[in-house]
Amino acid sequence: MRNPLADKIVEIKPSGIRKFFDIVSEMKDAISLGVGEPDFDTPWHIRDEGIYSLEKGRTFYTSNAGLKELKVEITKYIKRTQDISYDANHEVIVTVGGSEAIDLALRAMINPGEEVLIPQPSYVSYEPCAIMADAVPVIIELKEENEFRLTAQELREAITDKTKILILPFPNNPTGAIMEKSDLEEIAEIIREKDIFVISDEIYAELTYKNKHVSIASIPGMQERTVLINGFSKAYAMTGWRLGYACAPKEIMEQMIKIHQFAIMCAPTTSQYAAVEALRNGDDDVASMRESYNQRRRFLMNAFREMGLECFEPYGAFYVFPCIKEFGMSSDEFAERLLREEKVAVVPGTAFGDCGEGFLRISYAYSLENLKIALDKIQDFITRLRAEKQSV
Amino acid sequence: MREQILAIIEKNSRIDLKELAIILGAEEIDIANELKAMEEEGIICGYHTMIDWEKTSIEKVTALIEVRITPQRGQGYDNIAERIYKYPEVNSVYLISGGYDLMVTLDGKSLKAVSSFVSDKLSTLDGVLSTATHFILKKYKDHGTILTKKYEDTREKVTP
């Protein structure tokens, strides 16, 4: 039989998280700090709206780009949070999660061989999506000493005459890093000068704990070269509804809609009706979840300080990214031992890029009670590791 | 700061000072001062425990009683309300807008105890025009806490 497979896909490495997932699922009583989604249920009024839409028999396709009223709510939301105006008819698409929007944007903009800059550590799908779009992924390794922000110098050094797109993943999964307005202004200057485009993945935009999130599209001269991606998963605890969106200049959006139309048809209708409710009446829910995350974030940071575990203070998303280099083992080894010896699951930093080596992603999308139990175990574990190291 | 402290201790009054300070990013001494001040100002009125008596072997009957009364000159409803709330078995007394005047909740040992309270004590008070007693059959949610189900984490254990 002939080889039925596409070489391009076969060559893509499976997600580093997968292997971990397999070990954890064997262990019944493992405590996990490894989850990349909120622990809250979707607020009831949003779920209720989804149920109501089903009761009313709204069980048909929507238009390809999404329900008109949802697109209008999205533009209003972007206007009130970022003061950017988009045309709901031509510059917005509702997608199956933010992940689909990433894929669409890359496929709509890349010609084979063009380079996409991907800062890492970052979400696991950028690199494979770039490869699937026939781009050449170019990794920018972010550094702890810069609090895992992308600096102007790092960007400048990575740009070649083949560079087409920069992916900007902030607030960041897994590091929790954010880019503030002044950081964005510095890199925007280079982006305009070098005439490249930005795919800005702002799925964690609502979860920042210092200043409010600023979108790069709000920097002068950037809206016309930015695909802004956001969604409902993190802000409204709606991961399972699979709903995201992108806003982009008409010229790019037309092509994104074409791919979406032929590959997906439209995002789930029930989810779209629920999302309208989320954007209209969900601000208080977001604020109260943000406050809870912030309390847990402070709790974790304090616990790490007391353990003497080095960790920069993250101001976004719901992750902390402590450094474990002092123990002289790889992230993978550390995470695996922590799991086997203390039954606590965390994700090794390397799942998010090679430069995540020496770090762990710890999620605080858990109740304080849960965090306390897990932290006690982590404390025991590192005390033991330090003792081992002493006795050698 | 007060609002944040209250939001937390309303759900968990047993949280210790140190932890409260950590999660609010504040100094312990400042939190302690705020708590003390709020106690003195009567904002914090107590640190009670929520108990689902259903799950114990102790018999308890809770009733909601609608009370219609004639307000008294110069006193309004306050006098009668006071005569009612002084009974220790009375859990709460609210002045209500709408079809009746006072909403009284009552914990009794038995149906009989509650009914005799209503017929002997409550309806015989001067100014009480009528009462309607509703017995609680099941508590689904109380003080913002759902009593029928426990939170269960059904997420996958590790996700990107």
Image (cartoon, coloured by chain):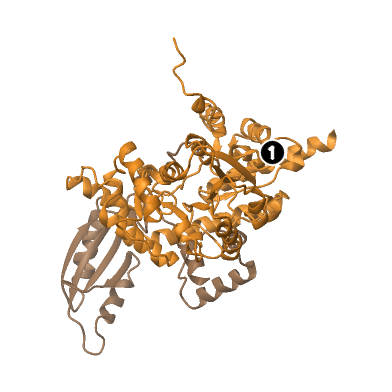
Chain colours: A orange, B brown
View extreme (front): residue? A161
Q: Residue drawn 71% across and 54% down?
A: A145
Residue B139 showing in the rendered view: no
Give the vertical position of A169 relative to B66 (above or below): above
Return the chain for callout 1: A
* Label 1 secondary element: helix
Residue at the disc numbered 1: A381
- Left/right placement of residue B115 relative to residue A248 reads left
Few, some or many C-alpha atoms within 10 Å of disc 1 (few <14, some 14-19, many ≥20)? Answer: some
Give coordinates of residue A137: x percent, y percent: 57, 40
Give coordinates of residue B129: x percent, y percent: 14, 74
Q: Amino acid at mark 1?
A: Phe
Give coordinates of residue A112: x percent, y percent: 50, 37
State the image quarter where residue A249 is shown: bottom left
Residue A210 showing in the rendered view: yes
Give the vertical position of A313 relative to B37 (above or below): above
Disc tally is: 1
The C terminus of chain A - image quarter: top right
Q: Residue drawn 69% across and 54% down?
A: A305
Q: Residue drawn 50% across and 36% down?
A: A134
In this orientation, which residue lies closer to the viewer: B141 or A161?
A: A161
In this orientation, which residue lies closer to the viewer: B138 or A100?
A: A100
View extreme (top): residue? A1
State the image quarter where residue B132 is shown: bottom left
The N terminus of chain A - image quarter: top left
Give coordinates of residue A228: x percent, y percent: 45, 54
